[in-house]
Image (cartoon, helix red, strand yellow):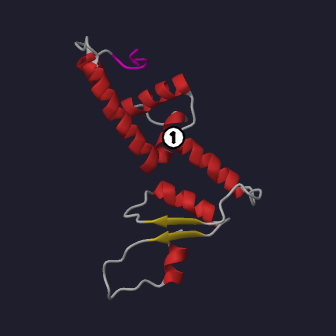
Amino acid sequence: MYVTTGFPKSFSACLYLADDSAGLKLFQLSGRIADLFDQYLVFRPDLVLGWEEGADEHWQATLWRALYADGGHAHRARLLVELEQAMGQGVPGSGTLPERVSLFGLSALPPVYVRVLGALAQHVPVHVFFLNPCRGVRPRHDVFSRSIL
């Protein structure tokens, strides 16, 4: 079933899908849009949460609201808000968090995960280990460990 609620017939995606009797175009377009929304959830969670509140009227916001209204399941951006609220309410019960968290081999870390690690670091030690290919440069561990989180 196509999600066309709120879209005019002249919308370019509707025109693109008009002659798609086999459903191949819909499948390919759905995959691209799903990838785009996934990137928004990781790199722009505030944008997606704003869409749910009614911000913006462009096609992405309209489609997101239609999809979210249909399923209503929690997504990464919503779960992050709930996690930050839960972590801000005080010390979690014993056994709910690991003794420590250690991360190895990261070459990049999206801001959303830095926020999660920052919230977690308020309760347990978080260690990030990375390779430094330069022999001459040795980062100061006390500055690095505090500045990343």
> Magenta stretch mostly in which secondary structure?
loop
| Pick the front one: 7 or 74 | 74
Measuring 28% from the left and 27% from the top, which residue is drawn there? Answer: 28
The quadrant the C terminus occupies is bottom right
Q: x, y percentage for residue 42?
A: 44, 48
Residue corresponding to mark 1: 50
Find residue 13 and report its image quarter.
top left
Q: Is residue 15 above or below residue 43?
A: above
Q: Is residue 94 above or below residue 9?
A: below
On the rendered structure, is 89 left or right of 6?
A: right
Crowd tier of the residue under label 1, counting other residues whose Cα lies within 10 Å: few below 14, some 14–19, many 20 or above: few
Q: x, y percentage for residue 24?
A: 26, 20
Q: Is residue 61 magenta?
A: no
Measuring 57% from the left and 48% from the top, which residue is drawn there? Answer: 80
Q: How many marks?
A: 1
| Pick the front one: 123 or 36 | 123
| Pick the front one: 28 or 17 | 28
> Which amino acid lies under the numbered mark 1 shown in the image of this protein?
Gly
Find residue 110 and report its image quarter.
bottom left
On the rendered structure, is 111 left or right of 107?
A: right
The magenta segment is: 1-8
Residue at far right of view: 93
Q: Is residue 29 above or below residue 95?
A: above
